[in-house]
Image (tube, rainbow, N blue to C red):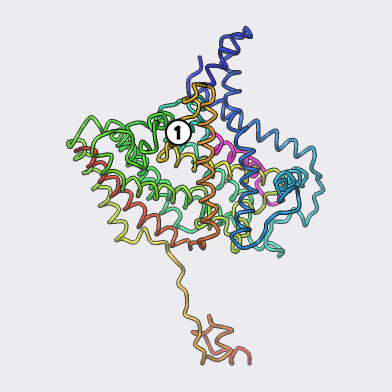
Amino acid sequence: MIYDSLIELLKWLSITGPAASAIAAFINSIFPVVFIIPFALFAVYLERKVSAHMQDRLGPMRVGWHGWLQSFADILKLIQKEDVVPAQADRWLFNIAPVLAFVGSYAAFAAIPFTSTYVGSGIDLGIIFIVAISSLVVASLLMAGWASNNKYSLLGAMRSAAQIISYEIPTVVVILTLLCVTGTLSLYQLSENQTGNIFNWMIFGGYSGGWQKFALIPFMLVGMVILFISTLAEVNRTPFDIPEAESELVAGYHTEYTGMKFAMFFLAEYANMFAVSAIVSALFFGGYQSPFGYVGKLLGISWLVPFEQLFWFTMKGMFFVFVQMWLRWTLPRLRVDQLMNMCWKYLIPISIANFLIVAFLMAL
Amino acid sequence: MLTEFGKIFAFLIFSIVFVLIALISAKIVAPARPTREKLLTYECGENPLGTPWIKFNFRFYVVALIFLIFDVEIVLLLPWAVTYRQWGLEGFAIGAIFLILLVLGMAYEWRKGDLEWERPLVRPPATPQASVETELHPVMENESPITEISN
């Protein structure tokens, strides 16, 4: 664990006691942001390129080679933009909302294991903590929508809140399904256990031996699809993007936001995209584990292994982010009532049936 | 020694500090020249009409209530699922009965129509034979004839 090494390092610098703990915890909490910001910059660029190529366009081409500096230009632009707070808005809530949005999505990274040597906080609650802290995002959306004193914002926020809380239920039922099989809530434990090779991943029935492993495969597949759909809805991506449907609601809850506050919502959105991808990969696709062995272990270079794990973690996360973008440009947007039907009448009954079947298989 | 939740607290503090640094640096760099028009609430270029702070549609509360019921039942299931492997078929029976009760409740909600997203009634569009006046004033159909008003 990096936290323990930091404590060791501080001891070597003759700093001990509570001060050392506080400094180490603070440094410990910086690592995800070092990962998220380059990711967000790259993902914005990737989104534009992917959408462009799917529509037979070229996308950004001017700023740097094939437009790769476009995101940096955007950041520079966003910093220089005037921060407009509408006269009719509720100033306090209007200013707090972007902070809360980012805090909610960033705190979720505390329980996501990046490598076997780095997880922000090794709490046993893991995935339930992530589900809980992500609810802060709902509060921030409602705040933003209400405080803007704008009809589009309020409609977007209400839709968004209804959608996120509805889709939380299939997510948690799938998590319960996995919990029956693994008995651990900690994503770190779960990822550690899915080591070895690709067939120890939960999608292939998990690491426990026996005939159940093979019987579980189809139900794990169903669970994975449900989890992916509902996490897609929780981060408001197309086809579930009615909260910010640009053709009817302008921009939804962040219609009135400009400059850096808008950038914070944007950053939180991309951080959330990666967080849910990382959760799907940690639950079903082995988290940071390599699908085959490690080069580091083969060559006997132990420090290489965490870097390889970080590579696989990033690759799996990026793959699911890419699938999200792919779906965005493939599927049309759902209507509000279709969206609610999809959740309450399809996903929840299917996930509960799936849960019962898996529980029965594990009881035998 | 810091507990694991202490580390999460560090995460919360750091993210607040991060956002504040970003917002303050933007405040220093960005211009601030507010005008009356700029501070108007955006409504596609029109002057805003009325307030959005109204009594909101009831269906959102129904969704929130159903969510609350499900969430509480899931919280009750969590400890059962964590220790599930120790109990065997007996544990399965207990959980299954609980879940079936939950599903029965959901079937009741479904039958009562609480899962339906209430849609406003859409009037069928006027028939092609209808006169231009009724197309222009479809709400007035049941009231006194339009000709009388215009006269």
Residue at 64%, 38% in the rendered image: A38
Could you tell me which chain the residue with mark 1 belongs to?
A
Residue matched to label 1:
A289
Find residue A81 and report its horizontal and vertical position in percent: 76, 47
Residue at 57%, 30% in the rendered image: B12
Which is nearer the eye, A17 or A360?
A360
Q: Viewed as shown, does residue A13 lie left or right of B1?
A: right
- Report which quarter residue B150 is drawn in: bottom right
Specify start and end residues of the magenta stretch as a single range.
A86-107
In magenta segment, residue A104: yes
Residue at 29%, 45% in the rendered image: A355
The overriding secondary structure of the stretch rendered in magenta is helix
Q: Is residue A53 above or below residue A30?
A: below
In magenta segment, residue B124: no
Residue at 81%, 44% in the rendered image: B31
- Report which quarter residue A205 is drawn in: top left
Which is nearer the eye, A318 or A279?
A318
Q: Which residue is farthest left?
A: B90
Q: Which amino acid is tagged 1?
A: Gln
Find residue A91 and report its horizontal and vertical position in percent: 67, 44
Q: Which residue is farthest front?
A: A299
The quadrant of the rendering that contains the C terminus of chain A is top left
- Report which quarter residue A247 is drawn in: bottom right
Q: SS class of the residue under badge 1?
A: loop
